[in-house]
Image: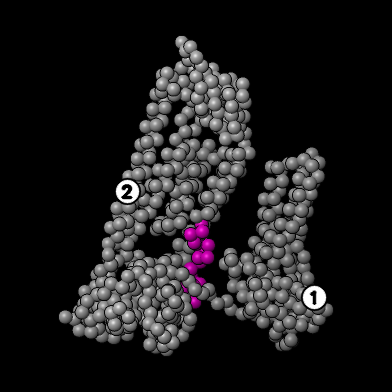
Amino acid sequence: MFHPAPPLPAAPPPLTDDLAERWLAARTAQRWDSRWLCAVPLLVCVVAMGQAARTPLLCGPAHPCGQSWAEGAIAAALLAEAVALLARPRGLVLIPAALLPLIWYVPDGLPDQVSRWTALAAQAALLVVLARAGAGRRAARQRLADLMGGQQPYPWTLAGAPAPAPPRPVVRLVLGGLLLGLAAVSVLTGLERQEESDARAARAETVPGRVLSSDELGDTEVEYRLPGDDRPRTAGVEVYWDAYPKPGDTLPLLADRDGWVRPAGDAYDPTVWLMAATLLGSVGLVVLGSSARSVRLIRDLAAPGAPALRVVHHPDGDEEVVGPEGGGPLWRLSTRQYLGWNGTAWVPLGDFPLHWEGEEDRPPGLRTALLYQGPDGASAPVLVRRWSHHDDREGVLELDWIAVVCTPQVKVLRRPRPTAPRPTDDQGMPARLRLAVGPAAALVLGAVVVSRSADGWWTGLLQPLLLGGSTIPAVVAALGWQARFDRDALVTSTGLTRRRTAWPEITAATAANGRVTVRTSDDQELRIGHRAVEWLGLGDYDPQALATAVTRAAREPTARPTTDTPDHFPELLVNRLSLTAYLVTTVTVWLT
């Protein structure tokens, strides 16, 4: 029998608030690195289907169009990418890196150049986001590793107890193997069906058919007669052409004596089997990878110790939340299993969180816990903390520790604290972005106008003018704004307009919804900033700090700069020319 465990090891260094800030600063592009990225390849598929519906295929009875395995390769690859982005395995950045050359060197995999360039741009964006996020995770992990230093013993090692043994993922191994088997069956079935269809087509006879009926879905009923038949035969075929056959049209058919019929020239379409195999195989690989990863993550629990940090446990309902000493919550852990040690044996506690009543009211010194391994590592983090619980069914269950086995992924509960702007600091978007946003928006909308080139006052002229006249200023205002502190005034730019407001005219400034509202003595309001800075992670923009700095500069002359700042905004000319060029292009396209 093991003796009760000693106190938690006190040697691990504490996670301080300063280290938490530096860890947050190192984790770049994390707000974009989420499972919502799986929508990107799906949106590419939607764009491709929309362009395919608008692109005439010039198919008809004389020139039928078919489908092959090669033409479905891009669609299958995009579907597999969506599954991978949803599952988030290791090495995720390799997927867009592989799809970029595939889309480039298989130009026939997408219906037209619009969808092709859309797919290339989407893959390039995914590659940049995933690469930046991966680099940020590695940098943040290295900062934690430097702090944690050497190995710290697990509490059960000090007590002479065995290490916890989470269950092996047998169900996932079986399920993954089953899904891969079904994917292989789908591929073999598609190949068999295609071979059978080609063999029957080689033995069939070419006969003229007369269309009896056809609907907009392509379901067509035809009448035909084989050589030697006394009476005509009828059959139903599917026609997926732009010009659907009409009753009375002649449709060349391939037919045999057993009732097999299809339009002449059509090839067997294996797309449904390819997509089924892609979906089943992708999910199967993800499940098998998850099971292998689970085994790898818990392998280090058998070691006598691991790098660790001393953290403060913050009970939060059904969540395991920890943070630095002297700071608030930082990480919400992704838990896998709860195990408890009662001095003699490990007690499985299931996969649900366990807190005692009133635990959140304990002082931080009594909520100290140890976090072994930490986030973003190659092994499973383990949160070790004290626990006791009263169960009405079993009485009081006293446990020395709870070992919360987690996954390396964490949800970050706070962002880096930007420093308050000094009176001489410019606030706003980066200079390159301010110069590029106007031309880029005008170019994209101009390409849409040129590709449509619709007739009529509304669709051809007024609608594009209203679209560009509202969209371009809105995009420029969100991504091209800037605020400068001057000795005599606050100078602001929205990308298209500039305003100079003297300090004595400013009465107050408040922050709300990512913007700063400056009120003047004549009851006017001037809005500065946009949430896009925060969303894109482009700078240390803090609306509240900016509002405080503006109010202080307006009320205290000593808080203002002592020199004049340049009153030159080059982006104003660039963005105005871009808007003018778009409007002129729209009118020119409509007139021609």
Q: Please give the residue where the numbered disc 1 appears in the rendered image.
A: 524
Q: CA distance from mark 2 to mark 1?
A: 67 Å
Q: Taking the image as drawn, is residue 533 in sight? A: yes
**Residue sitting at 37 percent across and 82 percent down?**
356
Q: Residues within 10 Å of mark 2 (few under 14, many from 20)?
A: some
Q: Amino acid at mark 1?
A: Gln
Q: Is residue 146 above or below residue 10?
A: above
From the viewer's perspective, tell me whether residue 579 is left or right of residue 353. Answer: right
Q: Please give the residue where the numbered disc 2 appears in the rendered image.
A: 178
The percent coordinates of residue 452 (x first, y second) are 70, 42
Q: Amino acid at mark 2?
A: Leu
The percent coordinates of residue 179 (x first, y second) are 35, 48
Q: What are the residue bounds of the magenta stretch?
A: 20-37
The percent coordinates of residue 35 (x first, y second) are 48, 59
Q: Nearer the viewer, mark 2 or mark 1?
A: 2
**Residue sitting at 46 percent across and 69 percent down?**
411
Disc 2, SS: helix
Task: Using the image as rendered, state which of residue 181 and residue 417 is in the foreground.
Answer: 181
Disc 1, SS: loop
**Residue sitting at 24 percent across and 75 percent down?**
346
Q: Magenta segment: does it hold 94?
A: no
Query: Split into 4 quadrants, where in the image is the N terminus?
Result: bottom left
From the viewer's perspective, tell me whether residue 34 is left or right of residue 172. Answer: right
Q: Residues within 10 Å of mark 1 (few under 14, many from 20)?
A: few
Task: Using the image as rendered, state which of residue 145 and residue 196 is in the foreground.
Answer: 196
From the viewer's perspective, tell me whether residue 415 is left or right of residue 410. Answer: right
Query: Split into 4 quadrants, where in the image is the C terminus?
Result: top right
Q: Is residue 270 above or below residue 574?
A: above
Q: Magenta segment: does it hold 24?
A: yes
